[in-house]
Amino acid sequence: METYDLIIIGAGAAGLSAGIYAARSGLKTAIIEEKLSGGTTADAPTVENYPGFATINGADLAEKMTAHCRKTGVIIHELETVTALNLQSEKKTIKTTRAEYDATAIIIATGSHYREIGAKGEKEFRGKGVSYCGVCDGPLFKGKDVMVVGGGNSAAITTLYLSGLAANVQLVHRKEAFRCEEAYIKDIQTKPNVQIIWNAEIHEIMGDKVVEKVLIKDAKSGETREIPVNAVFVQVGEAPNSQTAKESGIETDEHGYIKTDMYQRTNISGIYAAGDVTNQPVKQVGTAVGQGITAALEAYAYVRRPYYRK
């Protein structure tokens, strides 16, 4: 069994930032990530207004963060899933699909996963025209007709990205006003190949072996109509990856987000949480970085007593 001062679960913006600060503080630190480093930041076509970068490709920013983290000496275990946590003793135990680890402190930075719209055919056509990542799958539909579902920043960014690849982009929103930043709305309005469909929801996604058309329903009149498309990009928000933490006794709110205080502390001593998995209200790369740093410095204080803040 490997033993560390600190183990961070999740290698997104929060986890990588926590790793950098923890290692520089002198803690023996490891990060366990069930996928590849970068988290949802790596999926973003562009990240705007991250300090120092007016705009940067999400994958590039994630790569820079990962390289920086590794340079500090943090060991990153990729493609390894945490299956159970035992947090009842002073030494915490983390079980994964590959091994078992001991740590004095743990930071949970597991992020979130893409929400589904629950339409008929959504699960059946996932990977066959239904996508949750524009930058991952957008190039597969170059010159074709695609549809984006959502009304927030992620939907707007994905629409703008796809407008440069697809022949036509139809943006479907169940309300009559966007929740995204005004700058994105102005950019969308300049794109001649983007059409906005207000007050509508996808009722069914149809096709033979791949997506061929969708059935949308007007939220006001209840009328339905079919629209031929080659792909549907779902961008309706995210849900926290907190199930394992919850099962180990960590408190979550009614939406499943881990409860933390201003120091990123959870209800269990020595356990911290940072990033999109927490109940902190603003979900941005910058806020995830800040929370990760705070959690790392608090974990340092906990490990190197008597600096622990009670």
Image (cartoon, rainbow, N blue to C red):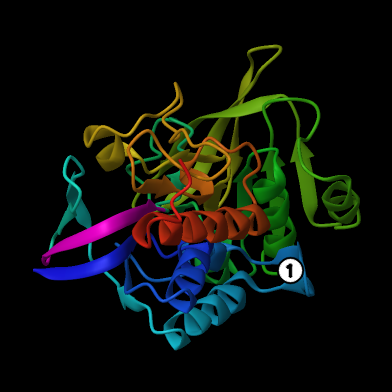
Residue 18 location (% of width, % of height): 48, 64
Relative to 267, residue 274 above or below:
below
Q: Can you tell which quarter of the image residue 304 is in?
A: bottom left
Q: Is residue 129 magenta?
A: no
Q: Quadrant of the N terminus?
A: bottom left
Q: Residue at x 49, y 84 (%)?
A: 67
Helix, strand or loop at mark 1: loop
Q: Is residue 217 above or below residue 97?
A: above
The magenta stretch spans which residues? Answer: 98-108
The amino acid type found where label 1 is placed reads Gly
Q: Is residue 111 left or right of residue 43?
A: left
Residue 137 seen in the figure: no
Q: Is residue 226 left or right of residue 80?
A: right
Residue 256 at x, y = what percent? 41, 30
Q: Position of residue 157 (x, y in %)?
A: 71, 56
Left or right: residue 156 versus residue 67 is right
**Front residue (pair 147, 59):** 59
In the picture, residue 87 is in which quadrant? top left
Where in the figure is residue 141, as x and y percent of width and height? 56, 66
Write down the residue under mark 1.
164
Identify the residue at image location x=66%, y=42%. Answer: 282
Quarter holding the C terminus? top left
